[in-house]
Amino acid sequence: MVIRVVRLGSDRVEGEGLRLGTVRRPPRGVPKSEFASQNWYDLWFPNLAPSAETMKLGQAAGTPAEWKAFERKYRAEMGTPEAGHDLALLAALSHRTHLAVGCYCEQESHCHRSILRALLVENGAAVE
């Protein structure tokens, strides 16, 4: 059992399990009833998305120093007790069932999901 870190909207792999959208907003122009069938996500889970302010930092990061500032701010947000419970829950579930978490960004290396991947591992999740 593992958690896959995926790009939302991408094709699902066999046995992927429940897909969670760790994004601030639902996909634009897509009816809610079609989120799952269009491979966006099965469940919206914005608890693990960066705040709007932090997300803007990440999107604007053009240098390693700016990306590091984004990472520090996002990690601080994920350091709250509430986020810690969510990360612990996903980590525990990863040992019982297949899950996927994701975001819309094209490149994982320039997306909060790269940091989310590390946070999940740090919390004991089985991550692919």
Image (tube, grey):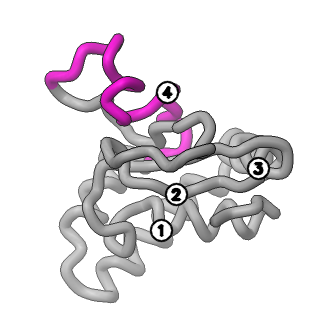
| Residue 94 circle label | 3
For this rendering, which residue is in front, 1 or 116? 1
Chief secondary structure of the magenta portion? loop
Residue at image mark 4: 42
Badge 2 amino acid: Val
What secondary structure is found at the residue carrying circle 1?
helix
Marks 4 and 1 close (CB-CB < 8 Å): no
Q: What's the amino acid at mark 4?
A: Asp
- In space, the residues marked 2 and 3 are separated at their CA atoms by 12 Å
Provide the residue span drawn in magenta: 29-49
From the image, which quarter does the C terminus lie in? bottom right
SS at badge 4: loop
Which amino acid lies under the numbered mark 1 shown in the image of this protein? Ser
Residue shown at the point (19%, 80%) measured from the top left:
62
Mark 1 vs 3, N-terminal side: 3
Crowd class of label 4 (few under 14; some 14 to 19; many from 20; radius 10 Å): some
Label annotation for residue 105? none
- Find disc 1 in the rendering and name its residue: 114
How many angstroms separate mark 1 from mark 2 (CA)? Answer: 8 Å
Q: Are marks 4 and 2 in contact (CB under 8 Å)?
A: no
Provide the secondary structure element on which disc 3 rests: loop
| Residue 82 to residue 116: above or below | above
Marked residue nearer the N-terminal end (1 or 2) = 2
Residue 5 circle label: 2
Q: Is residue 33 magenta?
A: yes
Which of the 4 image quadrants contains residue 70? bottom left
Q: Residue at x 68, y 60 (%)?
A: 120
Q: Is residue 15 left or right of residue 93?
A: left
